[in-house]
Each structure stands twice: as C-alpha cells, then as structure tokens.
Amino acid sequence: MLARTGLAAGFDFGVHPYMLRHACGYKLADEGQDVCDIQYHLGHKNIQNTVRYTQLSEGIRDAVNWQDKKQDFARESIMIFESITVWQAEDYLVRIQSGFFRTCVEAEAFGKQPLLLKRDGCRLVLFGKKTGVELDEAYDENIAVLRLKATAITKATVSDDDYEQVALRIAEFDQVPELASFGLLAYGVNEVTELRVVGHG
C-alpha cells in the first residue's frame, strides 16, 4: 500500500515502511534526542544500530547547511545509499534491505564484509563473521522472501525469473526447515532520496 502511495505521489524510487522507521530515527537524532532514548524508541537491542542514525543525521545536517547557503533546500534532494544483501537457504532467497549509508562506497563495503545471518524471534540479525558483533537487524517490512518455482527445480542453472515472492513472516521461518541457515549469495546498493519530516500541522 505504501509503495503504491509513493508512486501516486510521484516519487521515482520505491517507498517502503522501513523508510518511515528510518525517518523517525533521523528526526529524533536531528532534534538532539539522546542515543539511548532513540534506541529505546526504535527497539534496537544493539546500540550500534542506533548510532548509525546519529552519524548519518550529522552528515545530512552538514549537507543541508551547505545547501541552504547555496539555494532553497525545498528544491534539493539528498541521496543516501541502502545496502542490500541476498541470502540463500536451499530453494529460498531472502533479500534484506540493510542500513542506510552516506556514500555508495560505505553501503557496498557493508555488503562485501564477511557476514552471518541468524534469526532472533521476529527479526533477522546480521553479524560480522569474524567479530560476531551485531551489525544490523531486519524486520518483516524490509525483507522479501522468494522461493524457487516448481518448474525450475530441475534446471541446471536458474535466474531471477525462476523465483517467486512468497508471503512469509520472519516469525514463520521455523515452519520452513529450509530457512534454518543462510549463506550470503549477493549484495548490492540502492540509491535512495531521503524522506524527511520537516513539519506538521
């Protein structure tokens, strides 16, 4: 529904619910909220997931201040970059929209590092393979689960067209034995124009 609303509003990029969560984190950071308050508000178990909002918020604020000096910010947009990882679990693929980064290089570096993916209740957690440190988390609204079509099971090589999206929540993964463990298959980067709440009323 949100994606359709974004298209109807004329956005030339995909809008998803997790963007609203990120916008809330950035707004709280911009207002000077304490990082522990933001962590509590967003429900992060690891403070490192929250610190990203404050770091990115500072970078956006610097860019906005510079743009204000140059021209009217209302007509400007700031690009941020979203890291995408794709995980394979037998006949399933799980596509995860990870965190937002200030540069394409940072977003790509996130996907390139050795990662592990584990399920923790209603979230998927990305860990550094070497350090075991939690790097990011994913919820139902920022994942897509795809299953290999029955017609493609016997194929020697498969393509993206051989998969179909399935409605499966993270909490339901334990009902599918194939989704017990994951291997990183690919990573990528999306350019995203930041959505900012600048006022209300």
Image (tube, grey):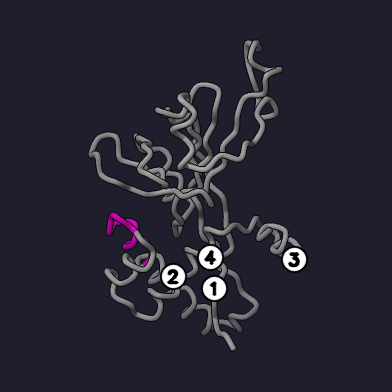
Q: Position of residue 58 (x, y in %)?
A: 38, 71
Which residue corresponds to the image point at 59% horizontal and 57% vertical from the top-left?
16
Callout 4, which amino acid?
A: Leu
Disc nearest the viewer among 1 and 4: 4
Residue 152: name its quadrant.
top right
Q: Position of residue 72 (x, y in %)?
A: 61, 84
Callout 2, which amino acid?
A: Tyr
Which residue corresponds to the image point at 36% horizontal and 61% vertical from the top-left?
43
Give the label on residue 196, or none: 1
Mark 3 — residue?
10
Give the label on residue 26, or none: 2
Magenta stretch bounds: 44-53
Q: Quadrant of the N terminus?
A: bottom right
Disc nearest the viewer among 4 and 2: 4
Mark 4 — residue?
20
Mark 4 touches mark 2? (CB < 8 Å): no
Numbered disc 3: secondary structure: loop
Q: Earlier in the sequence, mark 4 or mark 2?
A: 4
Front residue of 13/38: it is 38
Mark 3 touches mark 2? (CB < 8 Å): no
C-alpha separation, residue under disc 4 versus residue under disc 3: 17 Å
